[in-house]
Amino acid sequence: MAHISLTSLQTTHISAASRTSESRVSKASAEDMQDALSEVRAAQLAQPAPEIEAVDSFSLIRPKGDPYHLYQKTPELLEQAKSLAERLDGPIHDANADNFFFQDSMRDFLQAGLLTDPDFLDLSESLSDEELGELAMTVSAMRLPASANYTIPNEADRSYQEKVAEFMDVLENSSLEDRAAILSQSAEYASQVDTEAVANFRKNVYSQTPNDVKFSPYPRETSANPLHNYITAVLATDDPAALTEQLGQLPPDAETGLLSVYGLDPSLGDRLSQLAGPDGQNLPNSLLSALGSMADAVKLSPFTSHADGKFGFAWYGEEALLKDNEQSQGRDFALDSVSSMIDMIETFDFSDEQLNTMGSELNGLSNTEKRAYIEITTLGLEDMLHSKVADSFNKKNLDEAIEVVSELRTNQKVLSLVNGARYHDVTLIERPDIERGSFLVALEGAAVFQDLDSAVKQSRPLIGADTDKVNMVNGHSEIGHESENLYSAKSLDLYKNDVSNLVSTLVAFESMREDSTAKDKLSLNAFSDHLDDMHSGIRDETLNRVKQALDTNVIRNKATENTQFAFLSNLIQEMAFETKRDFKDEISPAMDNFV
């Protein structure tokens, strides 16, 4: 019978010299050697089978118990397994007759927990040689986990064997045609997996017995991401064959992007797949690629996840945006951005041109700018088209609303301002009870203004922070990616409240500015600079008060567009003055001693 060994294909070449040497071996000597091997085998079988304990360093090579009696309780499966072995790896030699399942591709199936599963053995008999080879390649490549941002949420409660078993269920419940398509696609992704990384992972990471093996984070290696995200998608979707056909019609960047969203959250991936349509042409490829890149950029830090929240190192500049609070580039933020974008596409009837514009513009931005862009677009359209306003208000249509948000989301100052809403300005004070110059305390947001004493007691010591690494302006560190400043990220809930107030104010300013016919109007850049110059605590409280005024519709009740715009400008100045006044009354006596 023909066989399809994945390993023997690479070693079938025999040199002419080897064949010449073999021809010199006499028939008699070959028979003598065979007789000797048979006697040794008979002597071994006559002895009682030793009880072999599972040892960590050896447990992935042998199953628990006596490895030579794998099919002792199910002898009827033995012949099926031998037939499978011959198809995969060639004829079974007499010397390997009792442990053929340790060799080549059979070892991968053994470690995946499949060789004693009668359903799998039945399935394998129904596969063509090509399909069986594709399945063997897939199961072997799945041994290397995806990167941590996909492995930790998706495989936390699922072992390698369990994921393989679920994939087998999908194959068993698929038609012959669909099964062939799924295996072909999985083998394509498996071929992209770094074989050296798989070997290193087996050698350095797998130390448990097969039944206990779990996926472990492997953050430096991403070649297995498409394969695992595809398997995750196939397990989650109601129609694996339709998804497979859709993926086959997408260009590589869009294909990877859709799979990355599935890896981020299978339900979001399903919704995005539905929006893209059966052939993937209902959404621009650039948009799928951009959303996928946000999922790829998720950072999960085991160190900060298990660290005491009251202590931590001082991180500076760009790195601080992640390390001071892992949520700033964590999965929750990515889920929020991607789900907001999908919600918006499901809600509004965008033209192809509008979707293409969003996709191309997003692809030209950094990950943090993508998030700001999505916040402006989703919150801005919601504010203008579904806001809490009186029924008499002449709502802008979608095209008009897009014009307003386009002015905002393509402005670098506005993107930077909205992106900065994720962080508190950090006020630094030196604790008298700590050695001078060695430790500084980060006081988050407006807490320093409202209750300095309690803020000092509850603040977080940042090891290694000193004045040489922090640009101090008016008692707090100056914000800027170009400087070595400390940042303190907000929780997702607090950030969403503050960024909503900020976008509402920017939308109101820009829409009223466009409606106004006044000759002297404050520019969007100047207005953004004005907000950016405020301490985050004052700005957040000011815009919260402005949003309350916007929700009551008092501005829109003014007589003319020019009056409305002037009233909004005055309102912002008034709210900022009142906020500073209220804070100043709280802190004036205490702050004199610290800043």
Image (cartoon, grey):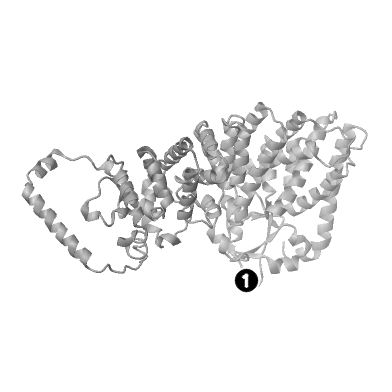
Q: Observer-nearest residue: 114 or 73? A: 73
In the rendered image, which quarter is residue 369 located in? top right
In x, y percent, where is residue 153?
56, 53
Quadrant of the frame with the N terminus: top left
Residue shown at 77%/60% (left/top)? 449
Label 1, on which residue?
434
Q: Observer-nearest residue: 363 or 562? A: 363
In x, y percent, where is residue 380?
75, 39
**471 sits to left or right of 510:** left
Q: Residue furthest bottom?
A: 433
Q: Residue furthest front?
A: 76
In x, y percent, where is residue 356?
63, 29
Q: Residue furthest right?
A: 559
Quadrant of the frame with the C terminus: bottom right
In the rendered image, which quarter is residue 436 located in? bottom right
For mark 1, give the secondary structure: loop
Tell me which amino acid carries mark 1. Ile
Question: Which class describes the residues within 10 Å of circle 1: few (<14), some (14-19), or many (20+)?
Answer: few
Above or below residue 518? Residue 299 is below
Residue 484 visible in the picture: no
Above or below residue 360? Residue 495 is below
Residue 429 visible in the picture: yes
Q: Observer-nearest residue: 421 or 110? A: 110
- Could you tell me how many numbered marks the image carries? 1
**560 sits to left or right of 257:** right
Residue shown at 35%/54% (left/top)? 76
In x, y percent, where is residue 257?
55, 39
